[in-house]
Amino acid sequence: MKRDVLVYLRGTQFMVDAPEEEEAQPIELVVPGTYTVQNDVELIEYDEIFEGFENYPAKNRVELRDGSIEVHKTGAAEVDMVFVPGKRNVSYYTTPFGTIEMGISTMAVDTQRDDDNINIRAEYALAMNSELVADCVLDMRVEMK
């Protein structure tokens, strides 16, 4: 059964070379989406609009499995990100401006559920072209309508 949801995303990057006095600025997004369960995998789908590419949204599909998260993005930006604690995943992040090799080393994944919400948190190190650039936190709340 497909349910309408509201997806709250907050991504925070703590840049490796940033001066200590510079605080990380989170990126926040609130978008409508859908939630379904297929073959014991929870699926959250939503569109993301990038400035300058309003007519070409990125389609996002988040897959929740036992202790892991997969994010598949297609459209204006394309990437497959896999978050499994203790594992490193290498992918290619393609944007209208070019392609970058992206490495994700996941430290922790936490998923909490109640009747009306799913709260997801992933903590990971982000490398671009094999260089560590940031420690990151992805927080997602999926609110059932």
Image: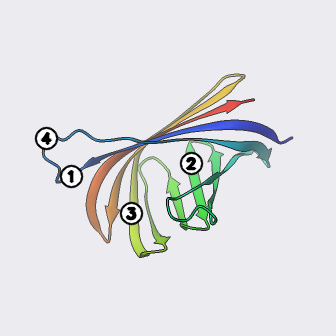
Name which of mark 3 and mark 4 comes first in the sequence: 4
Instruction: Report crowding for label 2: few under 14, some 14 to 19, many 20 or more residues within 10 A (C-alpha).
Output: many
The residue located at (32%, 41%) in the rendering is 25
Q: What residue type is labelled 4?
A: Glu
Q: Quadrant of the N terminus?
A: top right
Report how far apart the C-alphas of labels 1 and 4 lie in the structure: 10 Å
- The percent coordinates of residue 39 (x first, y second) are 79, 49
Tell me residue 132's x, y (percent): 26, 60
Q: In this view, does 51 lie above or below 106?
A: below
Q: Is tag 1's residue or tag 3's residue first in the polypeptide sequence? A: 1
CB contact under 8 Å: marks 3 and 4: no
Q: Nearer the viewer, residue 31 or 9?
A: 31
Q: Circle 3 sits on which residue? A: 103
Q: Mark 2 points at which residue?
A: 69
SS at badge 4: loop
Which is closer to the viewer, label 3 or label 4? Answer: 4
| Residue bearing the label numbered 1 | 16
The residue carrying pointer 1 sits among few (fewer than 14), some (14 to 19) or many (20 or more) residues within 10 Å by Cα, namely few
At x 65% / y 50%, what residue is drawn?
63
Q: With 94 as the anchor, is 127 left or right in this view?
A: left
Under circle 2, the secondary element is strand
